[in-house]
Image (tube, grey):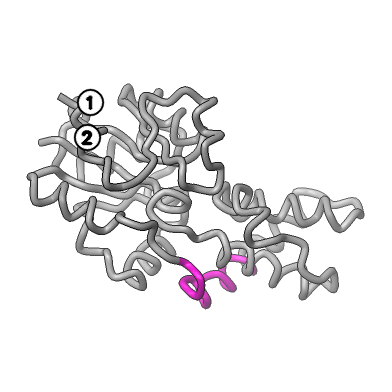
Amino acid sequence: MRCVVFDLDGTLADTSADLVASANHCFRALGHGDRLHPVEDAATAVRGARAMLKLGFERVGTAFTDADIDRQFPILLEAYGQAIAVHTTLYPGAVAAVEGLRRAGVATAVCTNKPEGLAHTLLAHLGVTDLFDAMIGADTLPTRKPDAAPYLEAVRRAGGEVGRSFLVGDTETDLKTGAAAGVPVALVTFGPAGGAVAALKPDALLHRYADLEAVMDRLVR
């Protein structure tokens, strides 16, 4: 069975504003005010909590250590979990594209570096849990992307065949994951990085979800 594995943040859903809000919650509590912008820092947001905290601390302008980031990390996750889908929306055409794959007998899965519990919560809020045969988060296995294991497990749980699968993502991490797993990667151009992902030279660029099946037909026999 063919299988399409999707990244979540910046690929299936525009989550950046809610991610940034959770980081700003930390900086406000520390007395620094909002340090991240929901649009201008979207590319940092989809790289994860630690990336946002690092950028915010850099903007504070005082010395900080990994210990400072470690202390704020669970606070950020708690704030995010309490307001996970205030501004988050699925990208246009995502639902129709995944539904089309499933009607065609293609297995579908999510493989994300968002913690598994939060990923399940977000998919439920967005009403799309049932569209995916499997979901692997950052803490489902001992390793996370770009290690190949999460991707391979996502395909296995979805009932797909690795040799007939590919990854849809939006970052260099996704590209490296595909290389590690030995599968093609399509990067979306409507995520936070926009058309700049072309410089990463993925196997395909996905400009809109309406083109997903055509991209699949090119990448997977």
Give the residue displayed 63% in from the left and 49% down from the top: 44
Give the residue displayed 47% in from the left and 50% down from the top: 10
Residue lying at the far right of the rendered structure = 62
Percent across and percent down for residue 34 are: 76, 68
Percent across and percent down for residue 190 are: 46, 46
Amino acid found under the numbered disc labelled 1: Arg
- Give the CA separation, mark 2 to mark 1: 6 Å
Q: Is residue 63 covered in magenta?
A: no
Magenta part of the protein: which range? 75-88
Numbered disc 2: secondary structure: helix
Give the quarter of the figure containing the N terminus: top left
203, above or below 114, in the image: above
Q: Which residue is mark 2?
A: 214
Give the residue displayed 15% in from the left and 35% down from the top: 2
Report whether 88 appears left or right of 150: right
Percent across and percent down for residue 79 are: 59, 73
Of the pair 41 and 189, the residue shown nearer to us: 189
Q: Which residue is mark 1?
A: 218
Of the pair 44 and 78, the residue shown nearer to us: 44
